[in-house]
Amino acid sequence: MKLQQKTLLIINATLLGLIGLFYTASSTIFMNSIQQAEEHEAQQTVKGVQSLLRQTQENFRDRYIDWSAWDDTYNFIENQNKEYSQANLVPATLRALQVNLMVYINTSNRIVYGTGFDLNNQTYKPIPQLLRDRLSSPNDLLLQRPNLTAKQTGILLSPEGPMWITSQPILRSTGEGPMRGSLIVGRNLDAKAVEQLSRIARLPIKIYRLDERQQSAEFQTVQPNLSNNTIFVQPISEEVIEAYTLLNDIDGKPALVLQVDIPRTISQQGRKSLYYLIGALLISGIVFDAVVLLLLNRSVLSRLAKLSREVGHIRNLNNLSAKLSVSSNDEISELTVTINRMLEALAIAQEKQQNTLNQLAQANQEIESLNNSLQSENLRMSAELAISRHLQQMILPKPEELRQVPGLDIVGFMQPAEEVGGDYYDVVQSNGLVKIGIGDVTGHGLESGVLMLMTQTAVRTLLENQETNSTRFLNTLNRVIYDNARRMNFQKNLTLLLLDYQEGRIRLSGQHEEMLVVRVGGQIERIDTTALGFPLGVIADINEFISQTEVQLQSGDGVVLYTDGITEARNAQREQYGLERLCQVVSQNWHQSAAGVQQAAIADVQQHIGEQKIRDDITLLVLKQQ
């Protein structure tokens, strides 16, 4: 068999074998890998949902620490004064706290006060009998206090349904004892709560009672694969995969089943990619086989035969001055041309080397020139940053503007970490309404400062256009920030809280740090803003995340707004300043004017920082109802 025939046979057989082998391997390995990746993604997703549940439970626990460690509560357990219950245990307070159960029990296991509460109808309800039975036992987990900081938080499964419950020791406001009892607070883990979790996770989430779920036929195949801390994944269709895990109650026993429906995006994309790949390989293989066989025969094999004959002729003549004929411009032809021009190529290479040295010298001069230009540019940029900081300080509300706000004693303070800060606050009056805003752009520096200026301009523009709807206001503002940040290629976003004040009433919306409501005696209520909005500039539309709540101020009451530059400020020992310390300073100095409260708080923060460099922008806004 000649070389031409052997070559054609080998290429054809090899190509067909590779296509078949690749199809078999890819259809097995690729889909197995996709299945493993899909299961891993599902498990990670469920772990993320579990983390969300833990975080929500911790937030629920921490929200009521101020109630259990409060002198008024401490005294109420002792003397059962009606003023406490009439002032604090009313429907409006229970609705604001989002609780369905509140029980005060002394150290003798006697319930001093207890009630259930229907948040939908805003009516009182009896305490669940299951909880009463538990509280009658002094050894129950909810009443165990190995130390003054011991708190029990978890899920309580009652006939009425599951609820988050937390039991905390009743102490003085300083956190000192002796303990006088326990405060037990509960919130229903109902369909509304699960729907909110689904909205945050952006996944369909279902939570069932384990005893109810065991009765369903479809759960019979799932239950044997579930145990503590395990996640079971099973596909139910080409589009959806279900993941299950168990949730323990407060006693550590399995009580609930968590089900997460996850889109099978990886599997769908994998199958589609495999089909496209195999189709492309088949078509490409057929075309490649035909073209290669034709071109190889015409352009390589026949010319190799001719070259072999000419080399044999030169060998027979023994004439080294003879040259091979060059019929085209490819590798075979270049073999002869390269030998004949070897010396010429060496001379050309030497000339190129000298040219390269000259180019390097010229490049060195250009680098020195660029270095000088960069030094000048750095000086110019420093001047621009100084001007930007001056402009930023100029557009902040002036003290005389704040003094003109009717009914409020209000002061503001901002200290940026670098030349231009990323914190924002503003106070604007429009048509009898006072709009107060505070925000924090991620990072700091010139980009953060530009985004802050953009936010201030957009807020005032919306007010000039008489936009009063809080949801539209925030969503429009988010769209402006999102579009401009993408246009300028800024990888920035910000948290923003907006307050509408009018005649002692505050309506707030947007996501930021907790808002501190300070009553006339210095008592502090902390309002969590997590569920009131979404960071601006992350996604184009945040309408579904926006909600609002209201706070009523009496004479002497007020509000304190701040950024995390205060609470996360660190001293030389790397200890954070913390929200608790800020609350303590504000409470102790609330008898002063707003300016006095602000000065005391900033002085305490600076004392905590000491000689350390300020790592983040510091902003504080204090307002008091006159």
Image: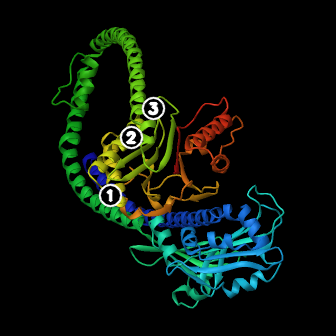
- The residue at the point 39 percent across, 75 percent down is 238
* Mark nearer the N terminus (2 vs 3): 3
Q: Amino acid at mark 3?
A: Val
Q: Position of residue 26 (x, y in %)?
A: 41, 62
- The residue at the point 64 percent across, 54 percent down is 522
Q: What mark, if any, has residue 114 been given in the picture?
A: none
Q: Position of residue 416 (x, y in %)?
A: 50, 34
Labels 1 & 2 near each other (Cβ < 8 A): no
Q: What mark, if any, has residue 468 been given in the picture?
A: 1
Side of 107 where 570 appears, left or right: left
Q: What mark, if any, has residue 451 been given in the picture?
A: 2
The answer to whether residue 1 is seen in the rendering is no
Foreground: 147 or 548?
Answer: 548
Identify the coloring.
rainbow
Side of 334 where 134 appears, left or right: right
Q: Amino acid at mark 1?
A: Thr
Labels 1 & 3 near each other (Cβ < 8 A): no
Q: Position of residue 65 (x, y in %)?
A: 68, 62
Name the residue carrying label 3. 420
Q: Amino acid at mark 2?
A: Leu
For the residues labelled 2 and 3, the Cα–Cα distance comes to 11 Å
- The residue at the point 66 percent across, 43 percent down is 576
Foreground: 230 or 86?
Answer: 86
Please, is residue 197 above or below residue 124 in the view? above
